[in-house]
Image: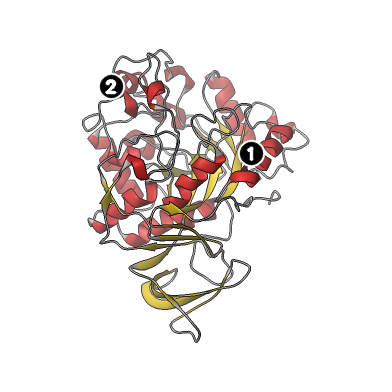
Amino acid sequence: MILEGRLWHPQNGLTEGCVAVGDDGAIERVAKTMAGRKQRVCGMLLPAGFDMHVHFRDPGFPQKETWASGSAAAACGGVTAVVDMPNTQPPTDSPTAFATKAQRAAAASVVDFGLGVSARPGISREAWFGELPAAFWKLYPYGKSWEDYRATATEVTAAGGRPLVIHGEHPSHIDMSPPTELAEHTAHRRLAEAECLAGMPASPQLHVAHLSTADGLAGLPAGATAEVCPHHLLLNLDACDSIDCKVDPPLRTPRDNAALWAGFRDGRIAVLASDHAPHLPEEKASDNPPSGIPGVETMVPLMLQQVSAGRLALGRLVNAMAEAPADRLGLPRGRIAAGQPADLIEVDLKAARPVALEQLHSRAGWSPYEGWDAIFPQRVWRRGELVAADGELQASRGGRPLFTAQP
């Protein structure tokens, strides 16, 4: 297969050219011109998204999401690789649980996948710590003392190997009582991020998930990397007061939006991630609504709309959604370059349409962005195979594990 048209070149930016894809699903060659039969790209060709923070709820919560539905949403939104978080049921916290989830993903996922593994005190002394092909270790603050939380972060970052991804909120500020309004949830956690990050180790092994505040950005530990989600860039308490928008970390203020945008644009926040966390509408309407919103299918389209509107440079988005997450996790992908997987999306920046629930694929069945303009990819290729076209899934299964051994 040879694709021809405007494409995002890693060194030259947007340029006219051709991409040849081999039978093995890798990019064979990128050049200005090529001989042979070609498919013309409308708009432009970009690297597909790599979302290193999703909750596909499988195993344990199939009513919310499965690997089949979550990966379909990812593919139709232009994401061809994901990392699933470990808070499933059972949690991904042992070689047995890891193997079970990996088998489920391999049997049903349309997109390539990695798995995060829950960190706990003493985990680096487990015999399998250096052998399990985890994408990263994930540390949650829920039900932990600050002393144990900080000690575990110090232990795992000092051990080396895979990165430690932290939920950057201080356990002492997490109030699990149901809020009566969204602002109450935010008020409970006003200082949680800044106080947590102030106590974290300075280490290049540390990655801060879903950064949400100006103070958190200012207090990132030395050497650490961070990610930001569309909802912490685009939503705030002034724009969204519905309890449906209860997320952890919570929505903040326009001041925090502005600081995060600045950090995202200049690369201090390197990675874009969705924190796709689907819950059903009836759960959100209950007396004790869970935290989380669906987002893997709308992440890239919403941010492409920001590019179209002139609020974000295309190169910064390409880096944040494809190059930076791959680099952070040590994977040779995310670029339109010879030898890399042919994970590509065809995009027309003039083809915006409103987000429509009936066109989304998550089992959640709702979105805080319903009616927002977004630019969905026209075609999506995973390792050279067309997996989505015009919002319709073109393949089932076929996803492969991203990690096979520790570095």
Res. 265 in view: no
Q: How is the image coloured?
A: secondary structure
Quarter of the view holding residue 22 = bottom right
Numbered disc total: 2
Q: Residues within 10 Å of mark 1 (few under 14, many from 20)?
A: some
**Residue at 48% in and 21% down:** 171
Numbered tag placed on residue 305 in the rendering: none
* Image-based side of 170 in relation to 304, left or right: right
| Secondary structure state at the residue bearing disc 1 | helix
Give percent across and percent down for residue 266: 34, 53
Q: Which residue is mark 2?
A: 183
* Image-based side of 231 in relation to 380, left or right: left
Give percent across and percent down for residue 20: 52, 75
**Residue at 40% in and 29% down:** 249
Query: As displayed, is residue 363 above or below residue 316?
Result: above
Give percent across and percent down for residue 333: 54, 60
Q: State the residue in front, 239 or 257.
A: 239
Query: As displayed, is residue 119 above or below residue 20?
Result: above
Amino acid found under the numbered disc labelled 2: Ala
Q: Earlier in the sequence, mark 1 or mark 2?
A: 1
Res. 134 in view: yes
Amino acid found under the numbered disc labelled 1: Ala
Q: Which residue is mark 1?
A: 158
Give percent across and percent down for residue 217: 37, 39
**Residue at 55% in and 44% down:** 83
Q: State the residue in front, 403 or 367.
A: 367
Query: As displayed, is residue 314 above or below residue 114?
Result: below
Mark-to-mark CA distance, 1 and 2: 37 Å
Name the mark nearer the viewer: 1 or 2: 2
